[in-house]
Each structure stands twice: as structure tokens, then as C-alpha cells.
């Protein structure tokens, strides 16, 4: 049983509403139920390979929806703490806090406009038992969601290593190395090369981006499978 009643969200979107979740892990949502007639969905996490994302479900007559995710940079004099310490110190509800990552200049983390509002007057955080002076700023110029495009690709099977390599346009050996290094996830979960993928799944790979598996377009004369993928880099 999933943590979110995905089918209820789908029914609301079919009824003409735009439905938006808080930040979720891949396993919190039934991605298969999102591949339903009459609706579309978008997933935003602030980073191309985000493990925590916000899902927006909307009627198919709406062409697109806005990205609700904001990425902030935390600047602090000393960084003798880790991302788990920062998550606790920020004290944001789970639905308002996405991925938290170390950066050359401090830390980056994904949140929403509501999260930004909650933090706008925060000037100090208690980290590792010490009160630190901190500042937050938008992560301008980051290669976060650098853009997306829809591609039709032909693959011999729906194995993760096959679909991922074809979708990102890299060699299968290169993509396989990423899988073995635990840098590839399906719906937020670390996956193996033989993991099958299906319509509605999200594939994410560090340094490459994210793939949304939109639909199966058909089968070629040679028995290969033609897929529609949305590539986010």
C-alpha cells in the first residue's frame, strides 16, 4: 500500500482540478496509476536526478503547469556539519523539503514558495550544537532543471540499462557503470540493470538527468519497442 492515495488524486484531476502533492519519495506514489486516460502529470525536484519530487496532476486539456520548486543556497562561515544536520536545523515539514545537497559554496536544498516564506526571516540555525549565522539566496545559474524535451526511441527491451542508455544518448557500458555505482534510481529507489521499467516510471541518473517514461507508441516490424520519453537535463 502506498503512502498516497494516487487513484484519488487521479480522479480529482479527471474532474478538472490541478492537484499538487508535497515532496515525495518515488515509493510513496503509485506511478502506474498516473498513466491514466484524461490526465497528465509533471514531476519537479529542482535537481535533474532528484530523489524527492513534487507531482502535479492536471486535466489533459491544460498544456502545461508551472514548476513549484525553488532551490536555495545556504551560506555559512563553517560547514562542519552534514546534510542530515541541516535537514533537522531547517525544521521544514517533509512536504516542503526536497533534496539537500552539499555545494562548493555551502549547501543547496529544494523547497517551495511556502518554504521560502518560512525561512525569509531566519538568520541563525543551530547546527552541531552551535548557533551559526546563515543566509539564504536563490541558486541562480545552477544547472538544475536545464530543460526538457520529448523523444521517441526504439529499444529491444524494457530493461533499465537499455532504456536509460538510449534515452540519455550514452553507451550502454557507460550507463551500466552508473548503475553499478548506485547512481541510477527508478522512482527514487536504487535499481539494478535488470530492473524492468514501465509507463509512468521515472529514471534518474547522477550527472545525466531524469527520464519520464510517458508511453509505449508501438512495436516495429523487427519486434523492437517504440517509446515516448521526456528527458530532463
Image: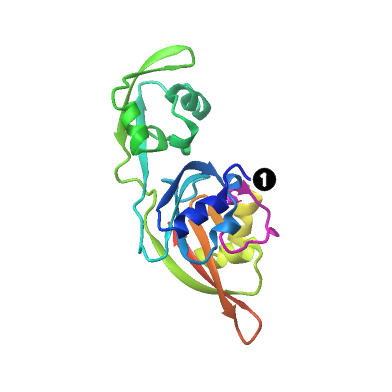
On the question of residue 101 being in view, the answer is no
Label 1, secondary structure: give it.
loop
Instruction: Indicate the position of residue 42 as horizontal and vertical percent values.
Output: 44, 55
Crowding at mark 1 (Cα within 10 Å: few <14, some 14-19, many 20+): few
Front-lying residue, 149 or 198: 198
Count numbered badges in the picture. 1
Quadrant for the N terminus in the image: top right
Q: Is residue 84 magenta?
A: no
Single out the residue that lies furthest toward the right.
194
How far across and down, in percent of the image, does residue 3 sit? Answer: 60, 42
Question: Is 62 on the left or on the right of 208, as rendered?
Answer: left
Q: Which residue is mark 1?
A: 1
When the figure is inspected, residue 9 is found, relative to residue 138, above or below; the finding is: below
Residue at left offset 68%, top offset 58%: 195
Q: Is residue 42 above or below residue 108?
A: below
At 48% from the left and 27% from the top, the residue drawn is 87
> Could you tell me residue 150's position as x and y percent?
43, 68
- Against 199, residue 24 (above or below) is above
Q: Residue at x 36, y 56 (%)?
A: 65
Query: Could you say where residue 32 lies in the image, as x and y percent from the top left?
Result: 60, 58
Q: Magenta includes 195?
A: yes
Q: Residue at x 57, y 47 (%)?
A: 5
Report the magenta residues as a range. 183-200
Amino acid at each position: 500500500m502506498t503512502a498516497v492515495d494516487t487513484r484519488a488524486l487521479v480522479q480529482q484531476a479527471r474532474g478538472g482540478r490541478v492537484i499538487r502533492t508535497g515532496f515525495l519519495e518515488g515509493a510513496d506514489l503509485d506511478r502506474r496509476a498516473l498513466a491514466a486516460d484524461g490526465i497528465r502529470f509533471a514531476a519537479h525536484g529542482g535537481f535533474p536526478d532528484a530523489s524527492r519530487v513534487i507531482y502535479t496532476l492536471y486535466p489533459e486539456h491544460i498544456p502545461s503547469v508551472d514548476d513549484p520548486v525553488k532551490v536555495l543556497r545556504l551560506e555559512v562561515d563553517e560547514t562542519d556539519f552534514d546534510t542530515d544536520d541541516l535537514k533537522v536545523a531547517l525544521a521544514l515539514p517533509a512536504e516542503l523539503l526536497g533534496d539537500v545537497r552539499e555545494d562548493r559554496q555551502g549547501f543547496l536544498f529544494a523547497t517551495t514558495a511556502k518554504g521560502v516564506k518560512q525561512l525569509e526571516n531566519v538568520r541563525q540555525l543551530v547546527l552541531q550544537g552551535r548557533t551559526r549565522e546563515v543566509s539564504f539566496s536563490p541558486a541562480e545559474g545552477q544547472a538544475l532543471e536545464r530543460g526538457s524535451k520529448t523523444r521517441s526511441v526504439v529499444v529491444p527491451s524494457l530493461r533499465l540499462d537499455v532504456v536509460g542508455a538510449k534515452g540519455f544518448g550514452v553507451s550502454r557500458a557507460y550507463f551500466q557503470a552508473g548503475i553499478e555505482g548506485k547512481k541510477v534510481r527508478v522512482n527514487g529507489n536504487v535499481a539494478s540493470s535488470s530492473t524492468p521499467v514501465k509507463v509512468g516510471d521515472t529514471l534518474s541518473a547522477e550527472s545525466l538527468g531524469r527520464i519520464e517514461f510517458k508511453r509505449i507508441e508501438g512495436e516495429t516490424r523487427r519486434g523492437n519497442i517504440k517509446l515516448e520519453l521526456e528527458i530532463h537535463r
